[in-house]
Amino acid sequence: MSKRTRIILGSITGFLILFVIASFVANPIIESKIKKTIVQEVPDGFQLNEYEISVSSFSGSATIENLQISVTDTIAEFKDAQLSLSKASFEGLSYWTYLFSGKIDFNSITLYDLYVKTYRDSTKTDDRKKQQKDFEENISTEKFTLENASFLMKNADESNALQLDSLNFSITDVKVNNTTLQEKIPFHFSEMEVDTKDFFYELNENETLSLKEFTIVDQHLKIKDFAIQTKSDSLKPNLEPASEIGRKDIKIPSLTLSDLHFKVIDSTFMLFGEDLEIKNPSVWIQEGIKKEPENIESTQKENNKKTEMPLPFSIASISINDAETTLLNPDESSFLQVEDFNITLKEVLVNTATLQHMIPCQFSDVEFDSKSIQYQLNDYDLLSLTTIYLSNQELQIEDLAIKTKYSKRELSKVLDKERDHMDAEMPLVTLQGLQFKVSDSTFQVSGNNLIIENPVLKIYRDKLVTDDTSIKPLYSKSIRNIPFQLTLDSLHINNGSITYEEKVNIKQSAGTINFSNLNASIGNVSNTYAQGEKKTTIHINSTFMDESPLKIDWSFDVNDLKDTFQIQGELDALNATKMNSFTKASLNVELEGKVKKTYFNIHGDNDTSSVDLRISYDNFKVEILNKENKRSWLLSAVANIFVKKNSDSKGANFKEGNATAERNKDKSFFNYLWINIQEGLKDVMVSI
């Protein structure tokens, strides 16, 4: 052997000897530092037992066995809380990096038979937050694993707040540091695998969450028999007829998500997935009796608090199939009933920002269908439909109806101020080009063409009920104040009918007017155009009182704050006696004669208006009725002295007049329209 070879071999041997010696020297140093770290991280008030630790700096591994942490007698609220661990295995640790830089980096960490028992902290005081220590270490591992772990959280009364048994859990590319610990999820990772059964968690003192199976394998999530339910011992039998806390029964038999993974995007830890499918979910919720908050100021602050999303997520497709939903009022009456509901959302994003919107998620496309929906619009009216579906941006609804849940007589008894009794039926409604969008935190809805086929609207108002003196906005203001951006290019009503009944005399039946064969074309129903850019236009053709063709052209600028409008109308021949079904009951007046033709043109705003009216009529006569609904000869004779019997008394075919009107703002737009027509007729027909 040459001298050079002997020197090389000697050097290698010496290095190995030094490395072995250094390893033996380093092992107790590392063991001491790990023990010191564990002691530092044990919360105040807990004690650590004697446990076994072995370190091999040569192989870069460490093992801790029979570790136990228990509470001391000084923390009464934790009672017999404890943590035990049969074995913890740490592989691939770079001890030299740990010794000289303080960074802890493993190939893997595995905890065997971890058992944690603790008690729910009901104090939530600032003092407890102050007791928390800053986490000074920077830990990372390629894989973290729990094998056969169990967790038990108790309430003060020893009932279970959380129970999780036989948990097998692993995550990869794990990072824990002082920054991640400030987040809702205190560590970052990329992939997860989970296998557990029979999970239970008490959401609050009245509700629980449970599931029978939760697995994540090969980035595929599967959940079985998920449920959120009201605790049975919370339903007190002596309560009227619903519990003050309400009741809840939400069940999801099956939930799956493919390609589940996690990423940090712009410093935000997020969940990502491909296809989320929820099968046969059922939601049954009875609202509790609302109580006035004891501290209104603190309640308002709580309501104004920004809703945080603990784990934002982005999923390519979410499908909910064969869902059923029932929402009940405290008196057990139905608020919402949905049957056989299916929905698919594409490119779904949910984060803290989206939660602040009217619709708390962002998506690119939606499709849904349902066989039956019933919804309580308010205390008096119900909405129902038999079929609804949305596909390829086309929405179709069959048998849409809005009906007052009381009879006409019953409604008058329960009202403290007047309100319409509604009976609206729309056999078919179609909306083409429907799109939803969120832009700059603003929710937007747009559509190309809304078509309503064969609608029937019946309205009844009992004027014997106390007047509703609230301000009624004009239609331009109502559209302007819709709480989202609406852009609807056109709306068409085909072959509709409207019947309006008004009861003003307790001894007489209600007066009636009607519009049949109603066809309407409405353009630019929108609150997104700048003022002056476009006007909402309404063109109506109808038959008035089953006899006289009626044409209406109406326009207004939604964003004109003065609510300026123009409405022009043309009414063909009408036998005046046709109006008696309304005037006799509502005005104690009977009419005779014939109106050959009527034109009117009204310009106005929210305060005042002017009307130009041209009318051609023959043999017009007014009969004033008394309380017994019989003709008052004296009043009728006096009235007819002032009424011009014919429009062509001076050889002209039309009699022209103009007048002004002032809006009564606690009445509807149609009251405003009638006042204008009335003032125009006075100017034409009354001689003073």
Image: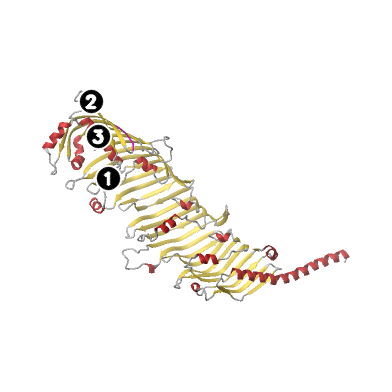
Tell me which label, 1 or 2, sits earlier in the chain.
1
Circles 3 and 1: CB distance less than 8 Å?
no
Is residue 298 found left or right of 151 in the rendered image? left
Query: CA–CA distance between discs 3 and 2?
Result: 21 Å
Which residue has dot 2 on it?
Answer: 653
Horizontal and vertical percent position of residue 485: 43, 44
Whether 222 is among the magenta residues is: no
Figure check: 343 above or below 149: above
**Residue occupied by mark 1:** 458
What segment carries the magenta color? 601-605
**What residue is at 40 percent from the left and 62 percent from the top?**
249
- Please name the amino acid that badge 2 sits on: Asn
Would residue 136 be found to the left or right of residue 468 on screen?
right
Residue 607 is left or right of residue 301, and the answer is left
Mark sitting on residue 553: none
Q: Nearer the viewer, mark 3 or mark 2?
A: 3
Q: Amino acid at mark 3?
A: Glu
Could you tell me which secondary element the residue under label 1 belongs to? strand
